[in-house]
Image (cartoon, coloured by chain):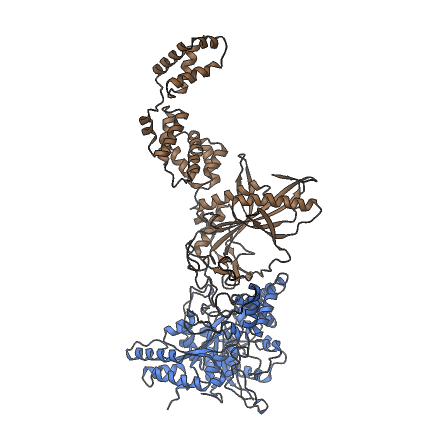
Amino acid sequence: MSIVQGTTGAWEMVIGLEVHAQVISKSKLFSGASTEFGAAPNAQVSLVDAGFPGMLPVINGVCVEQAVRTGLGLKAQINLVSVFDRKNYFYADLPQGYQISQFKQPIVGKGEILLDLADGSSRLVGITRLHLEQDAGKSMHDQSPNETFVDLNRAGVALMEIVSEPDMRSGEEAGAYLKKLRAILRYLGTCDGNMEEGSMRCDVNLSMRRVGDTKLGTRCEIKNVNSIRFVQQAIEYESHRQVEVLESGGIIKQETRLWDTSKGITRSMRSKEEAHDYRYFPDPDLLPLKFEASWVEAIKATLPELPDDKKARFIKDYHLTPYDAAVLVAERASADFYEKVVKGRDGKLTANWVTGEFFGALNRLGQTIETSSISAEALGGLIDLISDQTLSGRLAKEVFEEMVLSGKPAAQIVDEKGLKQVTDTGAIEAAIDAILAAHADKVIEYKSGKDKLFGFFVGQVMKSTGGKANPAVLNELLKKKLAP
Amino acid sequence: MTKLTDLTMTDALSGLTTKKWSASELVTAHIEAVEKARGLNAFITETPDLALKQAKESDARYASHAALAMDGLPIAIKDLYCTKGVRTTAASHILDRFVPTYESTVSQKLLDVGCVTLGKVNLDEFAMGSGGTSSFFGPTLSPWSGTDPAKAARPFVPGGSSSGSAAAVSARLAMAATGTDTGGSIRQPASFTGIVGIKPTYGRCSRWGIVAYASSLDQAGPMTRSVADAALMLKHMAGFDPKDSTSVDKDVPDYSSALGTSVKGLKIGIPHEYRIPGLNKEVDDFWQKSAAMLRDAGAEIVDIHLPHTPYSLPVYYIIAMGEASSNLARYDGVRYGLRVTGDNLNNMYENTRGQGFGQEVQRRIMMGTYVLSAGYYDAYYLKAQKVRRCIRNDFDSALSKVDAILVPTSPSTAFALGEKQEDPLQMYLEDVFTVPLNLAGLPGISVPVGLAANGLPLGVQLIGRAFDEMTLFKLAAALEKAAAFNSKPPFTA
């Protein structure tokens, strides 16, 4: 929970999120037009999408299956009967004059989502519902000084609106919610979760109350917050704005606000009084959506292992910390990569290398796991050289950098550069003897109680062996030699 | 010599097969009739060139013994059906220059069996009306003029909303026409003009490509001069369409095989509740007479109850207008149809819709918007849906005891142009006998049984079980035979 300290006391945030997730499907929710991103304007518009006279919607079964899959992934109640309603309003990019949505009877009911927080703890957030609806088109006001252009490619594309309970108490939790939801959607293959392309969009509902209060305050809905970072910034801004209003004796009006990305503020879009009356009613062109429990069970049987289960398994099987496990399962690709590398290797050591050096390199080079120049096999090869004590941790990092640059396998680099760790006790012993002989005075000092000099001797031996001496062997031998 | 425009479809077909006449001759005779009868204002768009081209193709098929089921029969299409390359207006200014790039499923099916299309016929704007008077292209006139000298000065309406279809078929301009029926728009004009009209079971015909008025009530159906022709037409209009989620995947029977079969032992229900206070005496007489004719043919007449009937009219208007207010939202001037510009988007909407829609359409959009509004939805729309369920249950329970129900089609004969214009409620009352079965989704057929004292035709209506059009055709044919209605309107082209 993050507290906003006002001048009159401490305030608590109450946050609920509404996410619009574009369903992965080849065609639109009620027409056969393509959904592919990036086509020329109005290239993917059917007569149904454009609202021509006499055109009728026909439900796309794939979208229904995707919604059910998502519902199952959110451990939610799946409604075997749901109803499509018309949400009526006028806008130039809404061809039918209504959006087909689900109002009273959504396809998915109550579910839950487990947040992984930065300190390694978890928190359960309720899902209120998930429903299917059509997306609208896009109005473009910047193409001409006195005309608006409309692109209907997006009109009719299937969206899942996923509504959370007002269970979140901080921007961090809101961010964790979005990350976890995105991970689940991507694991399921029901939405690509790409907020930049707009295939996942978020509205934030936020109200404030004094710490200890149980009654909810009046909320504002913030629209158009299209990245996790912006969601957190908008919450930060809006929570302080509301506290300021409340503390100066004002009241929060229920309203819709817009997040202004460039200014970093929220501003009023329309008040409750100005809100549309959407005149919802069941769409008479569509029959209630009905399916069998056995069909839902069949879909359930095809669900992949989801992040929470995977995390639990990683902790159990590979003895990882909850934090490391959460980092690894956040993306299916990283979890898969980890599992490839860890096969027959130490879980913790592998996790350290995957989340540490490897992710670091990807970040630095702007690469993804798919485009990375280092394969799971290559990274595994390097880890093997650490495990068999060929390389020390420090040497291994050097070799890794070389792998990143040259793409060569670790063993080859070790050979070529002669970086092999020296574990031959004779060679190390000789090096120790030479150093101790050269620093007889220091040996006397050490023996008279100056323990700190041990590190000095280690450093000198390492220097003389070019860093290749096995640190463990060196330590052991040195202790023996210096023993009284 | 046979007058080609007087033929029924079944007779015309046999003449085509035996080469008594060619499709081109048949079609030409009808094109000439259409031209002569322009005073009725039955057509919004005539397509003679298209018709002649189709007729030639039809003749070629007859010549090569590849004739289709309805090859060469000239029909008219209600201008609510979208027709590829032919202007489709819904009788509204807002669509008066709209040319679809697609053909409605039902009209395509008729083209596929060789029907020739003479053009697009007039209707009440967006099918909203019971007189054929709300069209942007002006009212349709009935070919009937009646014998009442007091009313001789004013023409009569053919009823509505399928006004052009009724006028064209009764005046012998087309052998048949497609209609649509949301609350009586096929049956009431059929009754007013002395022809046959059937509204099939909801889901029997595809609604795809037909401009929507009230989606849960709209159904396509034929209007013809005989029961046999209606059976032929419906067979080729009906059928499942994957493009319409509300169409039903059931085989279409050969309705013609029901004609002339015995009605002996069939039970016909006479609902007590249709004997409304102040029911026109003559309408009541024709109702009784029709029951007697069916009894004489071997059917058994039974008294039944449909207790929720009195709520039908308000329930119908709430649901129809609610749906219409949403269905007509797409006519916004953005993508097609009329656009009247304005200072901003809302202005453009107001100007376009204010000028594009006529008074009756605007009235229904406003009332429909009201009944769906927050705070009123539960009291109106939701309540109406519940009562609709009760009405449906009434019919279900009645039709578990009887095979069909016999009622009047309309509360009176046709009214004169200008009558019932000032008070829209008077017009809405026209639908009192026709709307209940739209609410229940059931089929109903109107059959002409005679002329009233004023010289105007009157029909009665048979209501059947869902998807049991066969029984309706059987009974309608028996009634048609017994009534032997063969009066022609004073005006025929």
| Residue A417 rendering spot, x and y as whole percentages | 33, 26
Q: Please tell me whether residue B286 is drawn above or below residue A133 in the rendered image.
A: below
Chain B pictured colour: blue
Residue B260 appears in view: no
Q: Please tell me whether residue A230 is drawn above or below residue A393 in the rendered image.
A: below
Viewer-side residue, A262 vs A451: A262
| Residue A290 rendering spot, x and y as whole percentages | 48, 57
Residue A39 appears in view: yes
Q: Residue furthest left?
A: B64
- Rendered brown, the chain in question is A
The residue sitting at 52% across, 64% down in the picture is A284
In the rendered image, the quadrant that contains the N terminus of chain A is top right
Total marks shown come to 0
Tell whether B74 sits left or right of A238: left
| Residue B353 rendering spot, x and y as whole percentages | 55, 69
The residue sitting at 33% across, 78% down in the picture is B58
| Residue A257 rendering spot, x and y as whole percentages | 60, 51
Q: Residue furthest right?
A: A249
The residue sitting at 31% across, 77% down in the picture is B61
